Amino acid sequence: MFCPLRYTVPMENKNAWLKYDNTKQVMDFAEDYRKFISQNKIERECVDFFVARAREDGYISIEEAKKAKKKLKAGDKVYASAMGKIVAFFQIGKKPLEAGMNILGAHIDSPRLDIKQNPLYEDNGLALLDTHYYGGIKKYQWVTLPLALHGVVAKKDGTVVKVVIGEDEAEGVLGVSDLLIHLSADQLEKRGNKVVEGEALNILVGSVPLKASSSKTAKDGKDGAAKNPVKENILKILKKKYGIDESDFLSAELEAVPAGAAKNYGLDNSMIMAYGQDDKVCAYPSWRAIQGLPKTDRTAVCLLVDKEEIGSVGATGMHSRFFENAVAEVYDLCGGYSELSLRRALANSNMLSSDVSAAFDPNYPDVMDKKNACFFCKGIALNKFTGSRGKSGSNDSNAEFVAKVRKIFDDADASFQLCELGKVDQGGGGTIAYIMANYGMNVIDSGVGVLNMHAPWEITSKVDIYESFKGYRAFLINA
C-alpha cells in the first residue's frame, strides 16, 4: 500500500500549515489555549480549571457516584482527584473495562521557584523571600524577570487561602535582582551552572518601612521602631489582604512563576510564548480531546499528574498508587471488580504519554541529529524512546504499537513526526511513559515540540498544538 513520503522519511514531512486553506480552527484553538495557560500557571489552578470544565461536560466525582450507588455504563463520565494536584477523567466505553483503556497522560507541574517555609527576611532595608528552585532550570534565566506568586496558605483553623500576587496590573510584580555588568567581572568567569547560585535566588518584595506608631510587633530602640520595619510592613500587607501571619508560611505552598499573560509570537502570529508549556501544552489538548467525546468502544481516560519534573514522586506523582486506585474504584462502579481483572485492564490498555519534545533550534544545531529531530510545524512529535545515552531510564515502545499509532494519526489526518531527544551522547530526558509501561500496557511519548524548554518563557507552534489535539482525539476513539 502506498504511503506518502511525509510519513516515512522524517525530513520530508510537510509543513502542517499547508494543509489548511482556512486556518481559523487552528487559531481559535490556540487562542483558547493561550487564555488557559495565562490564567492557570500551577498544578492546583490547572486541576480546578479542568474539574470545573469537566463538571460542565457532565462529569461527576467518583465519590458522588459511590454515594449515589451509581452503576456505570457506556458513556458515563467520572473523575478522581487528590490533594488538588492530580486528576483523572474517565469516559466509560462500550467494552468491559478488562479489555483495556485508551489513556492520554500529561503532567501539569513546571519548573519554578518555590518559597521556603521560613522565607521572609529583611536585609539592609529590603524585604526578601528565600526560595528553593523546583525542577531542572538554568538558574541565571530567572533573574531580572517580573515574577508572580501563586499558591495556597493553609491555616491552623483549617481554612485554605488562595494567593495570587503580581498578575493584576494594579499591583506590583516581584523578582530576583542580578549583579550589574559594571561589577560582574568575577561572575562572568564562572561556569553557567554557577553564575547564579540557588541560594541567591531571593525574591525582592518590598522596601517601605512600617512607621513606628503602626508597629505592634517586636521593638528595637528608644523610639519604639520595629526591629525589621520593612519586613513588618510586608507582613501587615499580607495580613490585610489575605489574613495570614508570618507563622502561616510554615504550611504554605507558594510558587514564584513568570508574571503576565502568554503572548502570541512571531510576525505571522504563528507561535505562542508562555510559561509552563512543558507540559501544559499537552495537558490542554489532552483534556479537549476527551471533552465532548462521543461514545467509544474502550474506556477513554485523560490523566493529569504532578511532580514529573522531580521524578514523578510523592502522593500526587505518577509513582503513587493514585491512578491504579482510581481505576479500581471505576471498575467497582462498573461491576465485576477483582484484583485480577484490574491487572488485566491495566495490561490491556494503550497510552500516549503526552509530553513535549525538544524542537530543532537553528541557533543550536550541533546538539541535534537533523534526520531524527523534532521540527516546528511538522505536527505531533512521537518519541519511540527517551532516556539518556544508552536509552537509560526509557520506555522503548514496541514496533507494533508505533505502527498502530501511525495508522490512527494518518487516518485522522493528524500530522506527526518520529523524533529523538537530541544526539545520542548529548544528554536526554524522561517522561511518565516508563512508569505506566510497568503495568505491561503499550505506551509511547507523543507531544508538542518546544523551543526554550524549561526556560521561564517557552515557545510552541500553534499548528502543532492543534495537530496534537486531532491526534489525541483520534487515539481515544480508535486505539
Image (spheres, rainbow, N blue to C red):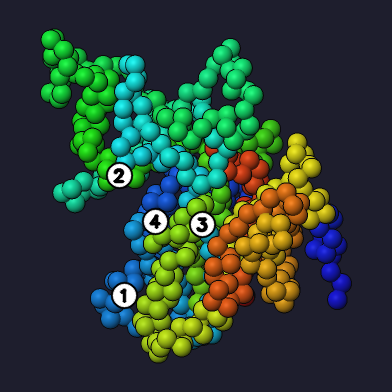
Q: Is residue 147 above or below residue 135?
A: above
Residue at horizontal 41 percent and vertical 29 percent from the top: 203
Q: CA distance from mark 3 to mark 2?
A: 22 Å
Residue at horizontal 63 percent and vertical 36 percent from the top: 265
Query: Which disc, if any, is residue 85?
Result: 4
Q: Is residue 228 above or below residue 66?
A: above
Q: Sequence-wise, which precedes: disc 2 or disc 4?
A: 4
User: Residue flagged by tag 3: what amino acid is it?
Assistant: Gly
Indicate the secondary structure of the residue bearing disc 2.
strand
User: Residue flagged by tag 4: what amino acid is it?
Assistant: Lys
Q: CA distance from mark 2 to mark 4?
A: 15 Å
Q: Dot 4 surroundings within 10 Å: few (below 14), some, or many (20 or more)?
A: many
User: Residue flagged by tag 1: what amino acid is it?
Assistant: Ala
Q: Sequence-wise, which precedes: disc 1 or disc 2?
A: 1
Q: From the image, state whether disc 3 or disc 2 is nearer to you.
A: 3
Q: Which residue does the numbered mark 3 point to in the structure image?
A: 311
Q: Which residue does the numbered mark 1 point to in the structure image?
A: 65
Tell me residue 353's x, y (percent). Answer: 58, 63
Q: From the image, state whether disc 1 or disc 4 is nearer to you.
A: 4
The answer to whether residue 253 is left or right of residue 364 is left
